[in-house]
Image (tube, rainbow, N blue to C red):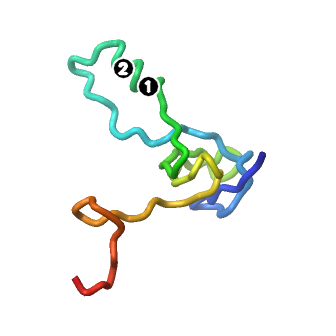
């Protein structure tokens, strides 16, 4: 199966030009007091959800840049999640007069 990825420098390219760097996991845990087991779990255990997730990609056969993008692994389509309002309660409604 193949799909296309949009490189921020080169534009839309075939996935075979890229190397998958994993999904975004947030900041590395503080090393102070971190056990070997906790570090192993942070470094090795990854969750792939059947919904849009932020991922890191490397364009090795092109411009050589690392970038992040949102992709749904169930459909292999680039998609961003719906924006959430400042309270974190639901989609934003820009221009609704509030």
The local crowd at label 1, few if under 14, some if 14 to 19, many if 20 or more residues have their Cα within 10 Å, is few
- Vertical placement of 19 versus 96: above or below? above
Badge 2 marks a residue whose secondary structure is: helix
- Vertical placement of 41 versus 80: above or below? above
Q: Residue furthest bottom?
A: 97
Q: Residue furthest front?
A: 89
Q: Quadrant of the N terminus?
A: top right
Q: Residue furthest right?
A: 1
The local crowd at label 2, few if under 14, some if 14 to 19, many if 20 or more residues have their Cα within 10 Å, is some
Badge 1 marks a residue whose secondary structure is: helix
Q: Nearer the viewer, residue 52 or 34?
A: 52
- Counting from the top left corner in percent of width and height, residue 24 is at 44, 42
Q: CA distance from mark 1 to mark 2?
A: 6 Å
For this view, does 10 lie left or right of residue 96?
right
Q: Nearer the viewer, residue 8 or 78?
A: 78
Disc number placed over residue 43 in the picture, else none: 1
- Counting from the top left corner in percent of width and height, residue 44 is at 48, 23
Residue at position x 36%, y 13% from top? 37
- Counting from the top left corner in percent of width and height, residue 5 is at 65, 55
């Amino acid at each position: 199966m193949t799909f296309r990825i949009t490189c921020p420098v080169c534009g839309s390219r075939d996935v075979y030009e890229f190397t998958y760097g994993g999904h975004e996991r947030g900041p590395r845990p503080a090393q102070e007091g971190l056990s070997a087991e906790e570090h192993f779990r942070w470094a090795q255990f990854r969750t792939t959800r059947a919904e849009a997730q932020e991922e890191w990609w490397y364009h090795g056969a092109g411009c050589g840049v690392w970038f992040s993008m949102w992709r749904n692994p169930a459909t292999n389509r680039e998609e961003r999640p719906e924006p959430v309002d400042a309270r974190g309660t639901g989609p934003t409604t820009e221009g609704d007069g509030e």
